[in-house]
Image (tube, coloured by chain):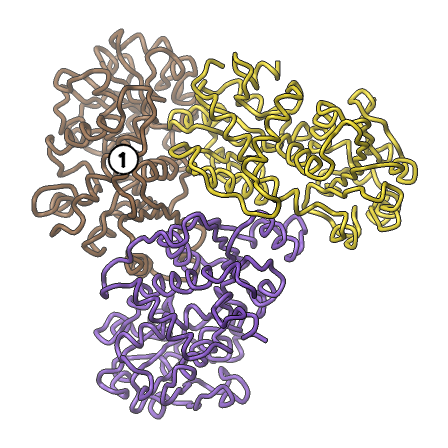
Chain colours: A yellow, B brown, C purple
């Protein structure tokens, strides 16, 4: 159902809600399109007129300056007009329902909703309900998915490792509560990664995590062996029940990425993190700032990936959904 | 005096503060100009370069995401630059007077103030005090006027009923506290509507309401008979003294618009509401979403009407006021 | 060190952090560039395409609607894209360090930071740490400097008095806590003003204030004699320890600028104030609004000065720092 919702009748991207249900070809098309925007590594993305006259609404029900900023910049570089609406602080205070808010914005003839919501499924719900001419991009919904983050991670991995088929990737930390991890696992498997591992204490792994297509490890020593790509997750203090972990320092001791632990992986392994990082909680500063870290490249790539996804989805508006 | 303030020496619109004092010709010119922006019903409004290089300030002393959004979109589609200033949260915290705030923004060579204020007369005051090159649009002042809302309502009525001269219109709900109702009544009478009725409990009607040019009814059964256009008002819970009404459910029972009550009007009557709607308080969901409802068309028309008013007022800046 | 930081290897402006260390030639170049934007006095600044495609970030760690507005307008008139980030309310709430915030914005390929911070030295710190392609403008840091304010003041003085070399200027009020006063004193001395006086009670003067290049007075009667330019400072109630002053009315009686005190200066003296003014606290309304006041011209000139500084600094990006 997600697939049908995300693609139009010609199989082109209309909404971008989840990695689930998207083909390897489509993910590769997104990466290639982003590459056309990104240009040479380190060069700024040029402004292009692709979405001139279009209105993109950042519809944030959950506050996130960082994510809002990357979408706003990506939209601006596509020459779209951007409308920021922070619902957390304003709209529903008059008691209007989510659906009425959506109906009203539709009636104003906006072209795209970029949705951030603390409830899983919110972006899907909006995509199901919204008018045919509108595209919906999921900018993070509850513990469900954060697919643009996963795609910028894939873009960064491909920049460094070229091909996914021989890659062994480890995702480390609070898998249980992480929408980022769910989307990364789906993307890596769809793109044909050789092995996807998760490394976490048992209390921070979902039940039957192997069914997601991963191998579970409970120690860095075992899990990092022979790894090409290390993805650290942010320890979401605000989301964690304190009973799940003894303490931050205990977590760092076991699962924090230190120079010593980094040596357990392949010598050319890259280190990734979706940010914002908690220095000394899940990652040591010398690793975060070290030569194997590609954390800031991820941020740069986030602009190009979001430009790619927004422009691809907008080219399908008007087509039968 | 309002007339002199709103028109320049050639009788053209300079400020848009109130329907009061504007001629039928001018209101019709606004509707015709909006029609040129709106194009075919349902089609998005195209971006036009009419106000390129102009700076429009959304000066909101009262928070309203919805109204701010419609003005921002309208300004953007006229290619103006928009500056959002939310005074409620920021400016007067340093103790600056309203007049000093205005003088400072004038000195920055902005071109238009869109003013929302909880005090009646605020937009008039600013228009009286501001520099000759600046236009002022009233986006709602206290319980006084909300003239752009009234004009988008007139536009919507004309779309459906073509001519005003045979129309019987009923406005229902809290007339006493409604700036929207005041502006609607003035607009309908100026445009020559055959009959304007208000339907409300006595506690929610102004003293001597007939002097506004309306007939007052206290029951839906009597008031809706033979009506072409039904305008429901939002029950402004935050503005109402609880002593004026027994309860929300009691209000809905007497004055809420249900499918049964809707049948009291003409079969082709249209149902309007300025939004945001309180489902089950003043209007039943099946009516709000039903075939006679034009509520979302009102929202769409709000963009075209505001584009019309902003562009007409800006063409007069520089002319002697 | 400030000089090296602010200028590139060819001696051109790269960051604008402080008046200190900048030459008379450079300050004059800024004034001349601003004049090219300002055009005739009273005429609005035209929009120019100088910074089209550039992204300017208003990075405000301290709330200031007025200052943010002037920078946003200046950037918009240079055709840049503007991103407003209010860190006070958002970013560091997730515990990210200032440096990580900067690194992330850099990675998004923004071109300029306009920094407002309650800590002295914040803009310098960011300029030291940021990537070579980024320019930093100080929009006020603690009690240290507010150099764009000082330059718009110099621009306004030059408009009225043509030449600095014969000018006697008095700065009046809370010198101790004023970043504006520090920057004004440096600018006036660099531009060769004949005499710079400060007039304040001893409790509101820094220790060894004469070392800044000023003469200190403790009474308006002595200090205003023969003065060409009077600069009143805002009494920063929120920054002052109440022990420093007996009361507002006592301060006004001694140091407030009344029509009577104004007569102590030269007949053609101009009256300036950085705003927002406290009427009846440091300045009488009849003086603030009187014929010798140039307070609103300062506001107008703020747009042109900030356009000048931003465009000069951006022309140097890419050059070796």
Q: Where is residue C311 in the image (x, y as percent from the top left)?
A: 41, 60
At 13% across and 37% down in the image, what residue appears? B22
Q: Is mark 1 on a helix, strand or loop?
A: helix
Is B242 or A229 nearer to us in this picture?
A: A229
At 23% across and 19% down in the image, what residue appears? B159
Judge left or right: residue C243 versus residue B121. Answer: right
Is B23 or A220 nearer to us in this picture?
A: A220
Q: Position of residue B167 (x, y in %)?
A: 17, 17
At 28% across and 30% down in the image, what residue appears? B304
Is A234 or A80 nearer to us in this picture?
A: A80
The residue lying furthest to the left in this view is B10
Instruction: Count every numbered label the image shows and give the total.
Output: 1
Q: Where is residue A117 in the image (x, y as percent from the top left)?
A: 59, 32
Q: Position of residue A34 (x, y in %)?
A: 58, 34
Q: Can residue B33 be seen in this view?
A: yes
**Chain where mark 1 sits:** B
Q: Is the N terminus of chain A in the top left, top right, bottom left or bottom right quadrant?
A: top right
Is A242 or C97 nearer to us in this picture?
A: C97
Q: Provide the residue designation for mark 1.
A: B307
Judge left or right: residue A186 versus residue C118. Answer: right
Judge left or right: residue C143 versus residue B172. Answer: right
Q: Can residue B203 be seen in this view?
A: no
Image height check: is A61 above or below C91? above
Image height check: is C95 above or below C259? above
């Amino acid at each position: 159902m997600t697939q049908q919702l995300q693609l139009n009748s010609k199989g082109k991207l209309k909404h971008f809600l989840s990695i689930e249900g998207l083909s390897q070809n489509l993910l590769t098309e997104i990466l290639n399109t982003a590459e056309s925007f990104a240009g040479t590594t380190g060069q700024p993305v040029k402004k292009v007129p692709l979405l001139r006259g279009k209105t993109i609404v950042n519809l944030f029900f959950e506050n996130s300056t960082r994510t809002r900023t990357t979408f706003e910049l990506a939209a601006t570089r596509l020459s779209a007009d951007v409308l920021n609406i922070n619902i957390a602080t304003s709209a529903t205070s008059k008691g209007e329902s989510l659906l009425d808010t959506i109906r009203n914005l539709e009636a104003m003839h906006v072209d795209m909703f970029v949705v951030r919501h603390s409830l899983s499924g919110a972006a899907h719900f909006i995509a199901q309900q919204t008018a045919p001419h509108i595209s919906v991009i999921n900018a993070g919904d509850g513990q469900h998915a954060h697919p643009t983050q996963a795609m910028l991670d894939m873009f960064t991995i491909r920049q460094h490792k070229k091909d996914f088929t021989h890659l062994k990737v480890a995702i480390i930390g609070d898998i249980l509560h992480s929408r980022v991890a769910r989307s990364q696992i789906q993307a890596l498997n769809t793109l044909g990664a050789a092995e996807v591992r998760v490394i976490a204490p048992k209390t921070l792994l979902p039940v039957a995590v192997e069914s997601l297509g991963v191998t579970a490890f409970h120690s860095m020593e075992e899990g990092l062996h022979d790894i090409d790509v290390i993805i650290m997750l942010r320890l979401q203090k605000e989301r964690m029940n304190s009973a799940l972990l003894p303490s931050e320092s205990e977590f760092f001791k076991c699962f924090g990425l230190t120079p010593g632990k980094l040596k357990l992986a392949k010598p050319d392994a890259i280190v990734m993190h979706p940010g914002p990082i908690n220095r000394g909680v899940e990652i040591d500063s010398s690793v975060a700032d070290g030569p194997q870290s590609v954390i800031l490249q991820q941020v740069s790539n986030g602009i190009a990936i979001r430009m790619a996804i927004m422009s691809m989805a907008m080219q399908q508006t008007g087509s039968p959904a």
